[in-house]
Image: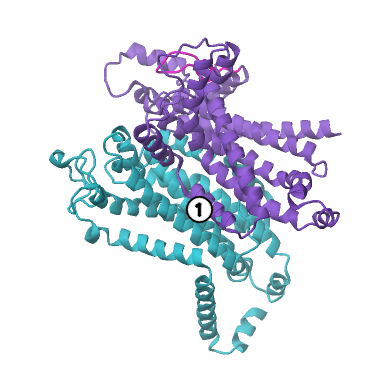
């Protein structure tokens, strides 16, 4: 029964993905000006033959609906076209940069959870104490702070003034690392390369904090309020009456029940992680997907922009789907 | 002709007077509640200061925000040993950071405010029609809204601005294109809930037209929620504007904006951190003020509304 429901939900995402593809496609084609002119820049050094070749490559001479059909055909075959500026398939560029982005998103998520869950729990248990008030004030600032500015402040503090942590790229130049998976942390563990592991972790530190800060703030607030809800329940009173200490009740009974809303929020934050990484990656020179697309925008590399934006949106839809599925397993009362 | 008209004739002439009195009384009540809500009050005061400063920017700014002078570039702020002529120091082109921040407030507030206004108008209009009549229009608009929600906000606006190119109105267009959806969903849901209530039934029995019911009966009951969401969204949109300007995709560099100012100082973090840090401080305080005021507004006007 559950399997069928999940399948139904999966099928329901198909029209959404199709719709996204159409929006991305239309955005590309309805841009004022001829894409070829724009892509070639205003250098004026382009021959007629080159323009024609470009038009052929991107099927610009075909009517709009044929172009849309060809775009879908490529999409189904997993072909997002070739990058204008680099002449490489877009899918290859995505594949190359994805590990860096996932590593950063993972670091941000771990940072956010490690910070936010204890703060949320303690704030709820010690409601209205100074710890609670201070934590909530800090989280409020965290929500109101743009990531790129936090990143710059962290660089000024930890890289420029204290000279503790690196501020650019994923690995120092003098460190050699054999690339196996593209995840530097995993690669350095696999090859037993201790200096590379430490170096990669150091590089990961500031970007993860920057990307994870607003998420941590939101998670802490949600964890606190759902924990407060749970603490009011009768079974908490009962457990206390049975002689369990306050913290034992919290650890044994409350945390698990308060996690549901938190997981919802973490799921919804996937979009923030994806969008935020464009900013954070360009602040820290992190060679991931986000920087790829920002660079592509400035190179006017439209096929690349189109492909990566498309990819982002699909990941976002799939992530929301996954969160929905995870719910049903954690909380069988919820139906898809 | 209609019953409604007759009722209007029976009612006392000073109906409008009582109505204004009621609004005034509500507003006074609101101010009283605001005074008891310290964080909302602080937010409101800060917000008023920001708005005043941005309105009177030409009188407050000490220098022309666009005037470059390489002889005085990267002067530190007063408390770092600078001089009072340039209280927040100067940037890499010798422009006065204080004056640029003052003018930058205009851009941030305008983008946030105009985008929210457009979003409220479109979202409320479509939300009322979709919620009240349901039917085909509702189905189409709702599907389209779902589609837009499938894009993370920043990715959508980066993509849109990549195509449109930097520019004040382009930015407002790109942001509004996505942000009306939330108002649409809010209003649609509220109208759906309100239209089954007795007062709407009563208005129907009195012979009021649909448009009258929506505008003068339902809307006043849901305007609270729209106001609260609108306020909180202004803060979010200001961060969006700054992020896009930081990437060079928002406000063109010729107009002083906080996001692009922060970007401009990136290469000078080692010797002139103030170029980036001060516009950021001002930005964070503004967004903080808006969020404090918005959350207070929610507690006062509409405690049941939960966002995010």
Q: Tell me residue B106's x, y (percent).
A: 33, 54
Rendered image quadrant of residue A169 = top left
**Magenta span has A116?**
no
In the current view of this chain or complex, which residue is farthest to the left?
B71
Relative placement, left or right, of B2 versus A298 is right
Colour applied to chain A = purple
Residue at left offset 66%, top offset 47%: B139
Whether B182 is drawn above or below A193: the answer is: below
Q: Tell me residue A101's x, y (percent).
A: 53, 26
Relative placement, left or right, of B52 versus A289 is left
Callout 1 environment at 10 Å: few (<14), some (14 to 19), or many (20+)?
A: many
**Magenta span has A85?**
yes
Residue at left offset 42%, top offset 25%: A296
Q: Secondary structure at mark 1?
A: helix
Chain the render paints cyan:
B
Residue under numbered circle 1: B233
| In front of the other: B119 or A46 | B119
Residues shaded magenta = A78-96
Relative placement, left or right, of A298 versus A336 is left
Q: Which of the colour schemes (rainbow, by chain, secondary structure, one colour) is used? A: by chain
Magenta span dominant secondary structure = loop
Whether A292 is drawn above or below A110: the answer is: above
């Amino acid at each position: 029964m559950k399997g069928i429901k999940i399948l139904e939900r999966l099928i329901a995402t198909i029209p959404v993905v199709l719709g996204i593809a159409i929006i991305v496609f239309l955005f590309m084609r309805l841009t004022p000006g001829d894409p070829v002119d724009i892509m070639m820049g205003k250098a004026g050094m382009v021959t007629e033959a080159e323009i024609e070749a470009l038009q052929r490559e991107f099927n610009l001479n075909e009517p709009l609906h044929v172009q849309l059909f060809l775009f879908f055909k490529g999409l189904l075959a997993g072909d997002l076209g070739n990058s204008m500026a680099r002449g490489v398939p877009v899918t290859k560029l995505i594949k190359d940069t994805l590990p860096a982005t996932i590593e950063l998103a993972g670091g941000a998520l771990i940072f956010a959870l490690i910070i936010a869950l204890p703060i949320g729990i303690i704030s709820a248990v010690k409601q209205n104490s100074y710890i609670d008030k201070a934590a909530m004030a800090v989280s409020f600032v965290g929500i109101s702070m743009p990531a790129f500015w936090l990143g710059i402040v962290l660089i000024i503090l930890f890289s420029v003034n204290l000279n503790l942590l690196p501020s650019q790229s994923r690995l120092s130049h003098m460190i050699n690392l054999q690339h196996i998976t593209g995840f530097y942390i995993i690669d350095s563990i696999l090859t037993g390369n201790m200096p590379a592991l430490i170096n990669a972790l150091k590089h990961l530190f500031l970007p993860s904090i920057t990307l994870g800060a607003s998420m941590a703030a939101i998670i802490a607030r949600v964890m606190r309020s759902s924990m407060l809800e749970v603490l009011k329940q009768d079974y908490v009173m009962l457990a206390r009456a049975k002689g369990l200490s306050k913290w034992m009740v919290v650890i044994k009974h409350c945390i698990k029940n308060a996690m549901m809303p938190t997981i919802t929020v973490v799921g919804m934050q996937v979009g923030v992680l994806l969008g935020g990484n464009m900013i954070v990656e360009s602040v820290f020179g992190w060679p991931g997907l986000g920087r790829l697309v920002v660079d592509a925008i400035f190179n006017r590399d439209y096929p690349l922009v189109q492909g990566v934006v498309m990819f982002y949106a699909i990941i976002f839809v799939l992530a929301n789907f996954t969160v929905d599925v995870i719910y049903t397993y954690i909380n069988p009362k919820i139906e898809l | 002709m209609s019953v409604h008209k007759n009722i209007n004739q029976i009612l006392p002439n000073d109906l409008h007077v009582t109505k204004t009195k009621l609004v005034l009384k509500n507003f006074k009540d609101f101010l009283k509640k605001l005074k008891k809500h310290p964080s909302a009050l602080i937010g409101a005061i800060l917000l008023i200061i920001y708005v005043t400063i941005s309105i009177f920017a030409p009188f407050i700014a000490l220098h022309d925000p666009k005037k470059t002078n390489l002889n005085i570039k990267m002067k530190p702020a007063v408390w770092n040993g600078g001089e009072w002529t340039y209280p927040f120091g100067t940037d890499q082109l010798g422009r006065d950071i204080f004056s640029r921040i003052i003018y930058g407030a205009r851009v941030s507030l305008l983008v946030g405010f105009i985008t929210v206004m457009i979003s409220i108008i479109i979202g409320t209009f479509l939300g009322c029609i979709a919620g009240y009549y349901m039917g085909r229009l509702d189905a189409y608009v709702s599907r389209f809204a779902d589609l837009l929600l499938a894009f993370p906000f920043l990715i959508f606006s980066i993509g849109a601005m990549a195509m449109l190119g930097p520019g004040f109105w382009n930015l407002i267009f790109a942001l509004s294109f996505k942000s009306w959806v939330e108002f649409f969903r809010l209003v649609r849901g509220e109208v759906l809930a309100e239209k089954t209530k007795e007062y709407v039934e009563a208005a129907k029995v009195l012979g009021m037209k649909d448009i009258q019911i929506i505008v003068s009966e339902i809307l006043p009951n849901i305007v609270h929620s729209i106001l609260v969401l609108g306020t909180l969204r202004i803060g979010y949109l200001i961060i969006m504007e700054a992020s896009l300007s930081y990437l060079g995709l928002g406000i063109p560099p010729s107009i002083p904006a906080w996001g692009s100012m922060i970007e401009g100082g990136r290469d000078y973090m080692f010797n002139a951190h103030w170029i980036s840090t001060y516009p950021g401080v001002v930005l964070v305080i503004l967004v903080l003020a808006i969020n404090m005021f918005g959350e207070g507004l929610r507690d006062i006007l509409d405690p049941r509304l939960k966002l995010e």
